[in-house]
Amino acid sequence: MILHRASDSVMLRAVSEEGMSSDADSDACEELDRRPPPQDPCYRCRKRVYPVERIDVGVLFHRRCFRCRVCGLQLSLRTFHFDQENDPDVYCKNHVPKFVGTIDGEALGVRTALNAPKVTKNKEYRSNAYNSGWQFETNHTDNPHPKGKNSRTSLGTYQDYERSGIFALQSALESQQKVEEDELYDTIRREKEHKLTSIERELELEKERSVREMVDAFEQLKKHRDDGTLELEKRKLEAHYRRRKEERVRLLMERLSADAKESVARLIEKHSQEMLDMISQRLSVGEPLDESIEMDEDVDVDVTDRKSKERPQPPDVCPPEVKRAQMFKSPCEFKQIDDHVFNVAKREHQSFTDLVKSLTVNCETDLEKARTIFRWITVKDLNKLVIDETVSPDSPFGLLRGIQMGTESYHDLFKRLCSYAGLYCEVIQGYSKGAGYRPGMRIEGNKFRNSWTAVNIAGSWCFINCNWGARHVKGPQYSDEDAAADDGHPQQFFYKCDEFYFVTDPEDHIYQHYPDEPKWQLLECPITLTEFITLPIVKSPFFNYGLRFSVHYDCIQYTQNGIVVLQLKLPKLLGFGYTFEAKDKSLSASRLEGRIMLRIAGHNAIFTIAPPKSGRYFFTVYAKDDWNSESLQSACAFRIKCVENRDVIKSPFPKVPFFGPTPCMQRCGMVPETHIDPLINCSHEDVVCSFKLEDPEVKLSSTFKYHGPWENDIPDFQRYVFVKHRDATSVTYQIRCPLQGKYVFTILGETGQCGEDGSISYDCLFRYLVECRQPGKDKRPLPRACHRWLQGTLLEPMTGDIPLDRNVAFRVRAPLANDVSLLIGDVWFHFKELHDSIWEGSVNTGTTPGKAKLYAKLDKERSRFSPLIEFQVK
């Protein structure tokens, strides 16, 4: 497996091996954008419709294409209308074509309407603001009347609870529920002790019987055996029964743990419903609680005698009416709420009532309530708790004993706290692509089983996952100054909140989680388990960094013409890394080097994978937003299959981490004008690329290297790049390829940081891959431009090598020069100025090989000449 990190000009390798030679032709980047022929085409755009983005109304549409043909309004299965007379296109209510004719059973319009495809208005598939995230950003509002984030809460605010006396009733109800919970935990503990005692008794009796049988057998054969042999056999027997006991205890504990979790989950479901019933009933009465009544544990809160028709039911399960971006633009909007939660988390609470009361004191909406509970759970390092099974339920730790004992999950705790806050929450069971899952793996049985939660916020069900939201991060949880002061402090794991798991859009959530009940996908058109498996592995950093796939990709990608191309859309310039691993472990790491090409073209990151041989491979993309950081986060993963013959296997790419721009280019104020895509294909002619400059004083340099496949005797490829023109606003490079093959052209810029010796430091600004299929006739080197070569144009000669003992004509346009001369050896040749700042001169090159430099006097007040261009006399 190899690991590359694309940051500036740094490349990391997990395994360092010798580079491999080319084993095929060099046109590795030919037909990079080849696409498979469309299947199941969309009626509107004619592109393929994949199952996860499908709308089927007799004809197929993408969700993003399911819009009114006239006004472009996003439609749903509830709001669309057919054109009854013409093609089966869709319209909104206001723009559906009207048919004018006789209204009877035989009328054409009526008959067409009767024969039109019928759409079942199932409440599970009602309208929402769904806009597929597979290809496009969804920053527009599809729902014409979305529910804003400032909507009132479903079951009251903190002030409503205070006014109605709900907090006092909650305390009384919680006390009753604690008694029931204590009884359950006592039952679990007693059953565990009884089962363990039974196992020990059974095994002890069985062991004693076996020992007696063995001793009797040895008595009969005593003359043939000694006492040492008997003792050895006894030790073997004891070891055998010890292993049997450990195995039986392990199986018993697994079964008891599963039973305990199920029992606790049922009890939490019951208690949560009782709490919601009480809150709803109290708010429906609307009268404040008599303050003269002192609530204590003996108060009986009746929540079970009401008729079922009076019990509040959770909202129908259906896709959310608004998307996450419509509820809040950024988690930064919750900074004030989060700061309050952090302060609350520092204190201990005696009851869930007190805890939720402290958390929700400033909450006005369901969204804010859910946020406070989510952040409290994610900020508390609950795994560090050490709680004895006999801890008092009235103690602060008693609230979280289920977490420590493993009988209660983060999701159960979240559901319990939501019920105290008046939020409907459901724990959903299903499969997840979590730790250990690889692209395309089968999902069956109990493997990859998981659970998560959905909470109802202002009438819409939203996914929240506290368990995955509190992810482990390795590193110091203090500032850089603290770290510097404590160099010996060991790095430990700490929790960091992953914002992706707070209110996750269903079309993003489905990449990782597949519920047992299709309705809990919260998609208008749920997908099957097979379709879920075929989705690529996509991790939360993919969405946190705003990445999107340019087209839909399956988890298994097959090579076409020896390569696979994967393209991601970028909201901004990000740093990337990748790993490429062969399933065939006999394939050495050196053969995997140079098999991935990453190029960043505009707002696209394009990965080209060229496997070295037929077989199966695993490809993982990592991302980061800080190029100077060593931390990379897994974004997405695929399985690559190459089933093609050896004649299409491509040669390796140059072993550099990436091609394209870097953040340094933005800081230096450079913008490409001609070649935004860093992959340049050329034949028979030079390449000319231009950049805009915002800083006219920026110092630039460049490197030009040949990466094969042919052997050559060219000593310096730097001479095949020439700064053709530079002024205050732009710079233009001329590149000449003398051989067929691949070249890497890197533009470097001054960072403003000097080394200890005073030398100038340069960083990579932009890197090109030049693929020369056929070099031109003129393979001569180019002149070399010096730093003072500004606003000039070289007219002749256009080659960097000038012959010996020849009269050579020079012409150059130099608007900034007051005098122009050429120095060959120790001889100066002064040029004559013509019109339009053109300087001309005829020079005899002499018989001695060496350098010839063109100088210009740029300051009238000084006699100093500055070098502009360098030639070689040979």
Image (cartoon, rainbow, N blue to C red):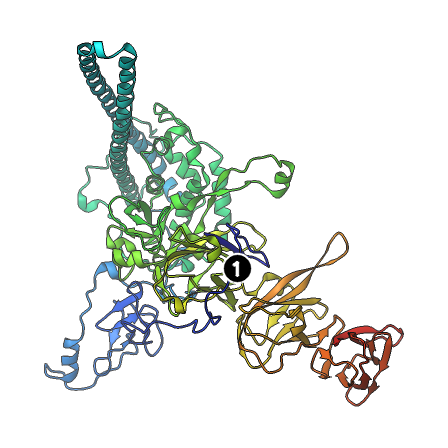
The residue sitting at 83% across, 79% down in the picture is 821
Image: 387 above or below 93 = above
Q: Nearer the viewer, residue 298 or 589?
A: 589
What percent of the width, then of the height, locates residue 344?
A: 47, 37
The residue sitting at 28% across, 59% down in the picture is 531
Q: Nearer the viewer, residue 861 or 379?
A: 861
Q: Residues within 10 Å of mark 1 (few under 14, many from 20)?
A: many
**Is 865 situated left or right of 403 in this image?**
right
Identity, as a three-letter code, of the amino acid under mark 1: Leu
What percent of the width, then of the height, locates residue 696?
A: 71, 71
Q: Tell me if residue 561 can be seen.
A: yes
Image: 624 above or below 43 = above
Q: Tell me if residue 186 can be seen.
A: no
Seen as rendered, the residue at the extreme bottom is: 835
What percent of the width, then of the height, locates residue 491?
A: 54, 38
**Is 666 situated left or right of 505 in this image?**
right
**Is 134 situated left or right of 493 in this image?**
left
The residue sitting at 38% across, 63% down in the picture is 133
* Quarter-of-image position of residue 34: bottom left
Image: 275 above or below 316 = above
* Quarter-of-image position of residue 306: top left
Q: Secondary structure at mark 1?
A: loop
What percent of the width, then of the height, locates residue 694?
A: 66, 70
Quadrant (top left/top right/bottom left/bottom right) for the C terminus: bottom right
Residue indicated by mark 1? 574
